[in-house]
Amino acid sequence: MPNPEEGDQRISLERKPISAKTFISYNMVHKLECKPKREISLPVLAGETTTDGGEPQPPKYQWQSPSMLIVFEGGDLNSARHHLLSSLHDPFGKHAVATVLIQESVRDVFIELLIQSMKPLDPKIYNHPNYVRSKAKLAQCKAETIVGDPKVVPAHASPTLVCDLSDNFLGDEPTGIIIMHTFRTPRDATLVLKKETIKYGFVSIWNEKVASAYEICALLKNDIFMINCFNVDLTPILPKGDSFTNDVRIEKGYHYERLILNHQRKIIVFAVGAIFAN
């Protein structure tokens, strides 16, 4: 165990063997791979700024509808990993995951799955000033970071998650770094989310118990939830104009629902094959 006083605590593939009982089953998505996109996204400029004296300041960038990922014990770890890896390799892209919450009981196996699949970032990403600045800040603190296997991924070009920092520690712009929190119970997860300041385009929940996921949807202030799916086309359920009436429909293999929960407007989507459980 590294001494916390020696700097970053980095997790790599040098871990003790994991029991076969903890691995995902064949019934989950099998051998799903995440290949980095050929077209890499860069953050959108929010505009140039100047000081009171008229001196130019570094350009400001804006988020592109980032998302939140919540992974529960028993959820489809392989599919959740697939979507998170896509964001790790293209962290400035539209709908990229900015924050991930992982249940403590599956944290270790999920992290190992991630590390095994990490590939070097595109130079456009690891040379971007926001990513460089974020990595420099992490080097100055003692936060735990999760990076790729150093035998495969150079340190300067590694996708990076940082554990248990607040979302604004690295700044209010897209950083190229994903924040990871660990939780034990659904209530823990909601308490963490309520402290986040990023405005998420949607929350993706991976939990075999869809009814339990609905309870989380009711507790959170977010508007759009996707259960056991990610970045689904919402056209079939988006309200027309200012009218927001309850509606349910099934299209293209997804259950779409528009409803009021705890006096808040919500849109919830899940794959039709998902099983309800208490």
Image (cartoon, rainbow, N blue to C red):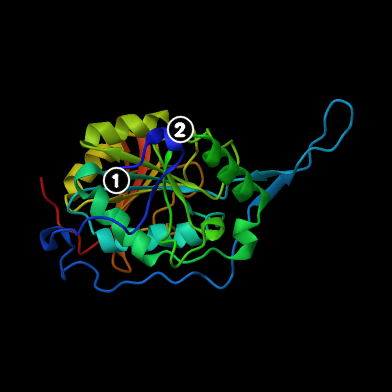
SS label for mark 2: loop
Residue at image coords 39%, 60%: 83
Q: Position of residue 65 (x, y in %)?
A: 53, 48
Q: How many marks?
A: 2
Give the labeled residue for mark 2: 166
Q: Identify which amino acid the numbered label 1 is placed on.
A: Ile
Q: Is residue 188 above or below residue 61?
A: above
Left-right relation of 147 to 58 = left
Q: Position of residue 236 (x, y in %)?
A: 40, 59
Of the pair 152 and 61, the residue shown nearer to us: 152
Q: Identify which amino acid the numbered label 2 is placed on.
A: Ser
Quadrant the C terminus occupies: top left
SS label for mark 1: strand
Of the pair 85 and 46, the residue shown nearer to us: 85
- Give the distance between the C-alpha atoms of the residues marked 2 and 1, in whole angstroms: 15 Å
Quadrant the N terminus occupies: top left
Which quadrant would residue 79 be assigned to in this image?
Answer: bottom left
Do callouts 2 and 1 mark residues in contact (Cβ within 8 Å)? no
Q: Position of residue 150 (x, y in %)?
A: 44, 61
Q: Which mark is residue 102?
A: 1
Local packing at callout 2 (Cα closer than 10 Å; few below 14, some 14-19, many 20+) is some
Left-right relation of 86 to 136 = left
Residue at image coords 52%, 70%: 37
